[in-house]
Amino acid sequence: SPLQHQHQQQHQAGDSLMKRAISDDGMALGGQLNAQQALQSFYRCVTGLDQLVAQMQQRMAVIMQKNQQGQQQLLPPHNAIVSDTNASTFYNMIAETVRATAAASRTEACHSFAQRVFNRMVERRAEPIAVHAYTHVLEVLREENCVGLTELITKWTLSLFTGTPGSGPPHSQSGTPRLLDVLVPSTLIKARLLQLTKYDQCLANQIPRNLSATATAPVPPRLLETVRFICSVVRAVVVQPSKIITNLGCYMALCTVFVHVSPHLGDNFVLERLSL
């Protein structure tokens, strides 16, 4: 069938990635890949994943359209791509590329690739399928013992929240407003790709313990925005999966300040976001 033929082509494409990378000029000593070759192989894999993401998005759109027409069908979960057979070909290829890269170039190549993947995840943060696909790429790098990976991902994710300049992705450069996206950090937390204690402490530090609000001195809009974001993250990683984790610093900080902040967040906002 046409679909089987397409799957066969994708599998063959994945199998040929390493051969194409190895055939390039500039082979590292000992027959291993140098950083440039590794990145070329990595990027080819991501190109293949992007095509699969697009196909899954199209299938989801068709199912949603049929559901609107009364033909009820179950939507696959957004993380279904992680277990997709064709996607596994590219994830395995990424792992093989890491192993085939010369030790002297491996960390450099993996960090450069991880940063590119993280940036793409942020750029496509409104597309849950893509976010899950890219998150699993980072998981593969972690499983291949990429040195310092979680520290870097935590730094980049925090830079989105704080809006502070740094060496992370372009979204964190000076003059760029902070990006209070929930899907990216919550997905990374669930995948254990963030240093949770450090991220949690950063969130907690954004909430003043002695906050009070009056008619003449209302809660600053930026702080209300921060509290809304933290509530949403806690809900995504604690409440929705029905996990009772009340020792998080950000959770405790929220509890101490809600008496002052909650009247300014709208009816039942706190109850809806954090009810355990």
Image: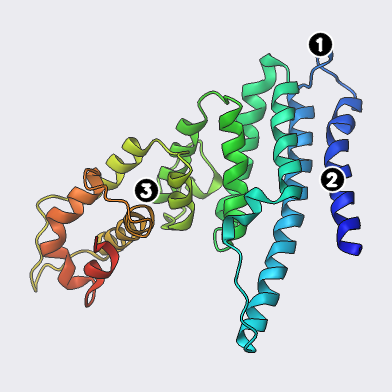
Residue located beneath label 3 in the image: 162
Q: Is residue 239 left or right of residue 86?
A: left
Q: Position of residue 25 (x, y in %)?
A: 90, 24
Q: Earlier in the sequence, mark 2 or mark 1?
A: 2
Foreground pick, 60 / 28:
60
Q: Name the amino acid type tagged 3.
A: Thr
Q: Is residue 276 left or right of residue 229?
A: left
Cα separation, mark 2 vs mark 1, equals: 29 Å
Residue located beneath label 2 in the image: 11
* Residue 69 image-quadrant placement: bottom right
Q: Position of residue 53 (x, y in %)?
A: 70, 58
Q: Residue furthest bottom?
A: 69
Q: Residue at position x 61%, y 27% from top?
A: 144
Q: Could you classify mark 3 by the number of other residues whose Cα lies within 10 Å: few (under 14), some (14-19), or many (20 or more)? A: some
Cα separation, mark 2 vs mark 3, equals: 42 Å
Cα separation, mark 3 vs mark 1, equals: 43 Å
Q: Position of residue 266 (x, y in %)?
A: 23, 76
Q: Name the amino acid type tagged 1.
A: Leu
User: Quick one: SS at disc 1?
Assistant: helix
Residue 133, placed above or below residue 40: below
Residue located beneath label 1 in the image: 29
Contact between labelled residues 1 and 2, with CB atoms less than 8 Å apart: no
Contact between labelled residues 1 and 3, with CB atoms less than 8 Å apart: no
User: Quick one: SS at disc 3?
Assistant: helix
